[in-house]
Image (tube, grey):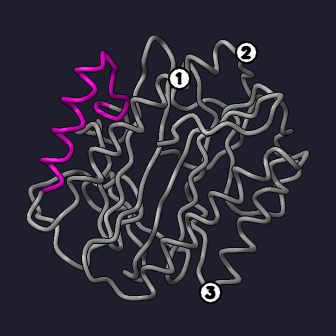
Amino acid sequence: MLKRSDPQRPVLKTAAEIAAMRRAGQVVAEALRLARSMVQPGVTARQIDQAVEDLFRRRGALPLFKGYPGKVPFPAVTCISFNEQVVHGIPSDRPIRSGDLVKIDTACRLDGWCADAAICVPVGEVSPDIVRLVRVAEEALAIAIREIGRKAFWSEVAALMEQHVHAQGFSMVEKYVGHGIGRAMHEPPQVPNFTSRDMRRHDCRLQPGLVLAIEPMVNMGRKDVVELPDKWTVITRDRLPSAHVEHTVALTEQGPLVLTAD
């Protein structure tokens, strides 16, 4: 949930701080398990959002999306996006239908530490191309999680993600990127899921203590996106489906640790 701009120096975390972030990550994982279980025809996005808000309240966690500043404050604790909606969908009373591709993104703060994750759920009978789209997005995320423990700079990881997506005939959204996370939901550095000419000047060294919210957004068609008049929902310009998945991942001395793992 972050637009692209110049990154800054990352805020590295201690082992104890990463353990505290893992506890927040477990609450986010529980929220997304609940949301996934509710994704079925007839259920509305607003009902899922309310269930996640209730869960955060029971766990003593602060939802981070609700009231998030923008052109207008975001009105919900989850972003729920359908089909050609890429990210930042506002939950409504629109019922889920068989054939939908539903993306659910949420974040919370627990005991002062944040976690952020997203899932992508095909509903009922969907086309083989949509199944492949979701698989490729999940594979891009898996590549990033694996490679941050092997590479020296984020640009090397982004290149592998982008290569995989393009090899499958899909495109990577470039207007929105992943981000550092810790005491605040959005911390430096910003972590694009793609490479660019000026990336070397704004690259991030991969080192223990780095915690990132990694979130590839993969389009079936072109990479171009537009924002709807609600001032939040982002859709593909060509109206073809998009997939979005995300994990909060810490780089430790022992290697990558997925803090929002189910």
User: In the rendered structure, does residue 173 fall within the stretch colored magenta?
Assistant: no
Residue 142, x across and y down, in percent = 65, 58
Asked whether disc 3 touches disc 1, contact meaning CB atoms under 8 Å apart, the reply is no
Asked whether disc 2 touches disc 3, contact meaning CB atoms under 8 Å apart, the reply is no
- Of the numbered discs 3 and 1, the one sitting upstream in the chain is 3
Label 2: element kind:
loop
Residue at x 54% of width, y 48% of height: 3
User: In the rendered structure, does residue 48 fall within the stretch colored magenta?
Assistant: yes
Query: Which residue type carries mark 2?
Result: Thr
Residue 196, by quadrant, is: bottom right
Left or right of 138, for residue 57 = left
Judge the density around disc 3: few (<14), some (14-19), many (≥20) Cα neighbours within 10 Å. few
Q: Which residue is mark 3?
A: 169
Left or right of 123, for residue 127 = right
Q: Nearer the viewer, mark 1 or mark 2?
A: 2
Query: Which residue type carries mark 1?
Result: Ala
